[in-house]
Amino acid sequence: MAIVKRKELSIGEKLYLPAIFRGLSMTFRQMFKKRVTRQYPEEPLPVNEVTRGQPRLAVNDDGTIRCVSCGLCEAACPAYAITIDGQETDRFIEREPERFDIDMLRCILCGFCEEACPKDAILMSDELELADFSREALIYDVERLKRPVSQLRPRLDYVYKVNERW
Amino acid sequence: MTKITLNGREIEVDASKPLIAACEENGVDVPRYCYHPGLSPEGSCRICQVEVSEGGRPPRVVVSCRTPITEGMVVNTETPEAHETRRQCLEFLLKNHPLDCPICDKAGECTLQDYSFAEGQTEGKTEEPRRKLEKRMDLGDVIVLDQERCILCTRCVRYQEEVTKKPELTNAGLASNTYITTFGERPLTGNYQGNLADICPVGALTLKQFRFQARVWNLEKESSICGECSRGCSISAEVLRRNEVKRIRPLFDADVNKWWMCDTGRFAFEHFNDAERLTGGLVASGDNLLVTTTKDALARAAEVLGTGGKAAVVGSAWLSQEEAAALAALAGALGTKAVFVSPEANELKDDLLHTGDPAPNRRGLEELGLKAVSAADAAAAVAGAELAVLAGERVLAGLADENLGTAKLVTFDTGPCLAAGVEVCLPAPFHIEKVGTWLNVDGLERNLTVARKAPAGVEPLDRSLNTLHAALAGAGAQA
């Protein structure tokens, strides 16, 4: 059995007080510095156009949906999160989605759908939060995915800027 | 047979066919829009150009669909000159083609897309606006014409002249203002309009019924046989998300339907998607039908049939040979002879494909000794018996208007039976969901294959009938 010999403490060390004051000085110094802790739900995360949040469908200023249900995002989706059925419209663009479901629990926010879209209709928004009481409630249908294009404009401009580099 | 050299390979080919057919038979894919093996060659699209050298002369680029084969011809499909000529043709074809692909139903099976991708030119050079024409021209009940997408290959015009022998479409206008239309803008007629959407190499002629229904790359395409008449055309049943049949298209079959099928067969698939599908057993208890498993329902059916008494066994005209043999054996065990409900002939008979007889396996069933009876006679036989087995797709629909009396019924159909005397309902597969054989009107064997998997709980009908037969024989041996 090995015997550990304890170190002999000096008077200052035996008193404890210098070490306590050194520790408290650190504490008091931090109290006057800028806080780094974020009070998350009350204080939201910073977002900008580079944020790749949940995909959303752009709606034109005249209220028509941009999506023509071509199915390219569905084909590009690596997580099989998207399901689309099309239908005919009376508009000049003859086709629009009858059903456009994104299973947000499957979505991995990769942005392939945004990249595949030939109509700039699906864009990665800055919305990141996702919580509900059932899985079914997190399969978003077209009404829950619609966002006015003005809201998605910064992302749209950013995507164009990035694509120009290629 | 004539000897030619194709891409450096010496081959023997049939000189009566155009060069493009010889290339195809020898595994060399030449692009084509206007050429269709079932129609006369036209040479209007110019995309099938290949390099040909005859009699030692310098090679030149010619259209392979209108070039006759000569002895000693040297053909090269992949030279830079041939590729460049094809790319230039494509550029002209695409000059007025709208960039509709995200909306177009043809996207995914469009050869214009495929060859554009293969030749690799991504941008046009023209600055003039594209032609503006009718985008949604209604051509009757079946077809919608998008004139802007048309590349004027005239396959549709030749199809109507040569196959249906009823010219209704034409190209009107001159030169760059040519467009496809019908005479006097009248709607198309006839029972063979759906083929126009198949032969159209682009999305100009599309099916109204399939319009915007599905993207073609999401469809699982499996071969089967059409069950709408006794011709037994080869079809491809195209299924979306493993449950819904979205489209039926003809498959090439040299002996029966060539490249074509009639609209009656093409659009007869709604019943495959019926929500009223029986996927387990239903057993009578008092006035109610209780849901149970197929296995338990089969055991109950054996009990019902084991009680003895005068029996009637009625099949449907959609039974395969295997199912009909099993049904005939079961009928023998019950001391009777199996018959099948013969649907009445309809007025769709024509010279091309439709036979006017809606019973697809009439010839096979009659060869097996099943007698064809009318719905009224079948119902009378059932009403006159104490026990009855009704088996096969559409057997209940065939007897729906008849009085089946008070016989105890054991039914095998795709849907439930709601007649008064029903004891046990068992599920049966549709003909696109089973393996089997039909004999068509000419006595040719038509092989049914599983184009769509039957829902869980639906057993193959021949297996169910054999199980029932074995259970009855076992009960007889014990007694």
Image: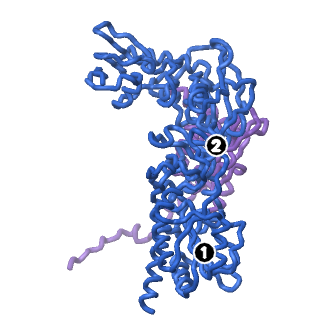
Chain colours: A purple, B blue
Q: Is residue B108 left or right of residue B59?
A: right
Q: Position of residue A13 (x, y in %)?
A: 40, 68
Visible residue check, residue B316: yes
Q: Secondary structure at mark 2?
A: loop
Farthest residue toward the right? A62
Quarter in which the N terminus of chain B is drawn: top left
Which subunit holds the residue at mark 1? B
The residue at 63%/58% (across/down) is B343
Element class at badge 1:
strand
In the displayed structure, B288 sits above or below B126; it is: below
Mark seen at residue A6: none
Q: Which residue is mark 2?
A: B210
Q: Nearer the viewer, residue B73 or B92?
A: B73
Disc nearer the start of the sequence (1/2): 2
Residue A13 lies, with reference to residue A95, above or below; the image says below
Q: Nearer the viewer, residue B231 or B345?
A: B345
Disc on res. B425: 1
How many neighbours does mark 1 have within 10 angstroms: few (below 14), some (14-19), or many (20 or more)? many
The C terminus of chain B - image quarter: bottom left
Image point (48%, 27%), residue name: B115
**Type of amino acid under label 2:** Phe
Amino acid carrying label 1: it is Cys
Where's residue B352, x and y in %? 57, 39
Please tell me which residue is depicted at 64% across the width and 82% down the height of the picture: B284
* Residue placed furthest toward the left: A1
Instruction: Give the spatial CA distance, label 1 vs label 2.
Output: 34 Å
* Chain letter for the residue marked with disc 2 in the picture: B
